[in-house]
Amino acid sequence: MPTRIATVQYQALAELRYQIRQFLSAGDAAALQAGLEPQQYQLLLAIRGLPNTMPATIRVLAERLALKHNSAGELVNRLEARGLVHRARTANDRRCVLIKLRPAGAKLVEQVAQQRITELRGDGTALVSALNALLAPGTTRPQPKAKLKPLPKIAARKTAARKKEKKRTHHES
């Protein structure tokens, strides 16, 4: 049976969410000040910040931004029209399209990121404190998830169809 959550933990969780919202709100304002919509900055940052082993495909970027594939594609279209990114097909698989920063996009993302890092170094203690309050020894840790029951046959067919569709759209990106 899970341990009850103490009031202090609710307060720490609420404070963490507040601090995250404050950080994100300030980031949106910094993006707008640089002439970017917040999602445009997020996409540029996602491209620039991807691990070297992860290709910047529409699928990967959509996942990183929690967007649908077509929404991420439209966002890339807008950035491409502004000359901030470009699409490049890979040599080994011409169906695979990578999204790359153009110099203007790299300059903008660096400008906003530098401002955000400076602000975080100055004002990030509240965010860190809120996170530390939740991770302090003696706090309730999440319980392991129960094993899932097998899906009914109809749900299993829908899941299989979704996987097939994902695989098909992955090859298109």
Image (spheres, grey):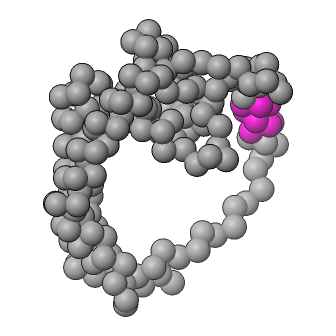
Q: Position of residue 100 (x, y in %)?
A: 55, 27
Quadrant position of the C terminus in the picture: top right
- The boundaries of the magenta stretch are 157-167
Identify the main secondary structure in magenta.
helix
Residue 166 lies within the magenta run:
yes
- Residue placed at 56% from the left, 39% from the top? 63
Residue 15 falls in image quadrant = bottom left
Taking depth in this image into account, of 79 and 165 the one nearest to the observer is 79
Taking depth in this image into account, of 37 and 103 the one nearest to the observer is 103
- Residue placed at 23% from the left, 27% from the top? 34
Q: Position of residue 53 (x, y in %)?
A: 67, 47
Q: Position of residue 73 (x, y in %)?
A: 54, 20
Residue 39 falls in image quadrant = top left
Whether residue 154 appears in this view of the structure is no
Q: Position of residue 61 (x, y in %)?
A: 54, 34
Whether residue 57 appears in this view of the structure is yes
Whether residue 130 is situated above or below residue 56 in the rendered picture: below
